[in-house]
Image (cartoon, grey):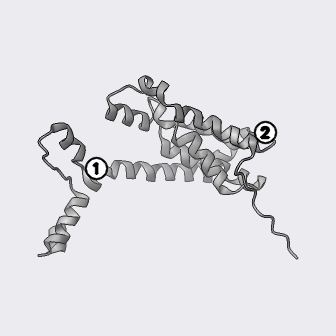
């Protein structure tokens, strides 16, 4: 199909084939050749489908009210800024452990706590930063998570072997709670007073 669209334009055809198809470069070194060879956009379709499924799953859980009932468990413990952030961190870690996928954990954590952060008057960037600290950086540490499996496969080292050396990944969720306790860079939404 790409050949019919491109016609005689070899540059367009080459660019499209590079994007979609696989590319290979023989470097003379098998490890380097494997590193620079890609599968193109076709090789990324599994990831794209996973992201789309995660978004649909999060939307279905939100629309059906399941996220509301899960969130109500956390709301009971939320008194102040630290408990809001700590609940977000704990639920993000829990979702990372149970859903075994980073994308689903990010979407569900964001959907679960968006309204709570708005009601408490915090800006969305606090939720975004807390989700990043709790979900994104910890997913490579979980052996059955897709990120942990990918890292272990690429590095050819088991997740539990490199876990003790991942200082940033381990400390990041704790730092998020500590920063909330200090109150550093935590901004409340401006209150709109009708005049």
Q: Is residue 49 visible?
A: yes
Number of numbered discs present?
2
Image coords of residue 38 (percent x, y): 24, 49
Residues at marks 1 and 2, CA–CA distance in whole angstroms: 44 Å
- Residue drawn 52% across and 42% down? 136
Instruction: Mark 1 or mark 2: name the one nearer the start of the chain.
Output: 1
Q: Which mark is residue 165?
A: none
Crowding at dot 2, Cα within 10 Å, few <14 / some 14-19 / many 20+, comes out as few
Image coords of residue 45 (percent x, y): 33, 52
* Lateral position of residue 3 relative to residue 79, left or right: left
- Do callouts 1 and 2 mark residues in contact (Cβ within 8 Å)? no
Crowding at dot 1, Cα within 10 Å, few <14 / some 14-19 / many 20+, comes out as few
- Residue at the far right in the pictured view: 195
Where is residue 95, by image quadrant? top right
Image coords of residue 155 (percent x, y): 33, 32
* Lateral position of residue 166 relative to residue 178, left or right: left
- Specify the quadrant that holds the N terminus: bottom left
- Residue drawn 18% across and 43% down? 33
Where is residue 123, by image quadrant? bottom right
Question: Dot 2 lies on which element?
Answer: loop
- Residue 121 sits above or below residue 88 on the image: below
The residue that mark 2 highlights is 76
- Residue 146 sits above or below residue 52 on the image: above
- Residue drawn 75% across and 42% down? 182
Q: Which mark is residue 43?
A: 1
Image coords of residue 104 (percent x, y): 51, 45
- Residue drawn 80% across and 43% down? 80
């Amino acid at each position: 199909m790409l050949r019919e669209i491109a016609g005689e334009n070899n540059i367009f055809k080459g660019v499209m084939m590079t994007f979609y198809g696989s590319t290979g470069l023989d470097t003379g070194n098998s490890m380097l050749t494997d590193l620079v060879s890609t599968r193109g956009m076709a090789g990324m379709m599994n990831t794209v489908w996973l992201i789309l499924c995660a978004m649909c799953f999060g939307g279905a859980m939100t629309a059906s009210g399941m996220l509301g009932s899960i969130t109500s468990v956390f709301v009971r413990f939320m008194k102040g800024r630290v408990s809001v952030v700590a609940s977000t961190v704990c639920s993000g870690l829990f979702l990372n452990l149970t859903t075994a996928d980073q994308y689903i954990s990010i979407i569900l954590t964001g959907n679960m706590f968006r309204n709570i952060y708005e009601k408490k008057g915090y800006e969305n960037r606090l939720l975004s930063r807390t989700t990043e600290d709790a979900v994104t950086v910890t997913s490579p540490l979980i052996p059955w998570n897709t990120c942990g499996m990918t890292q272990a496969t690429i590095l050819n080292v088991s997740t539990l072997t490199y876990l003790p050396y991942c200082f940033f990944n381990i400390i990041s969720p704790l730092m998020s709670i500590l920063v909330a306790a200090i109150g550093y860079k935590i901004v409340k939404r401006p209150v709109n007073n009708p005049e």
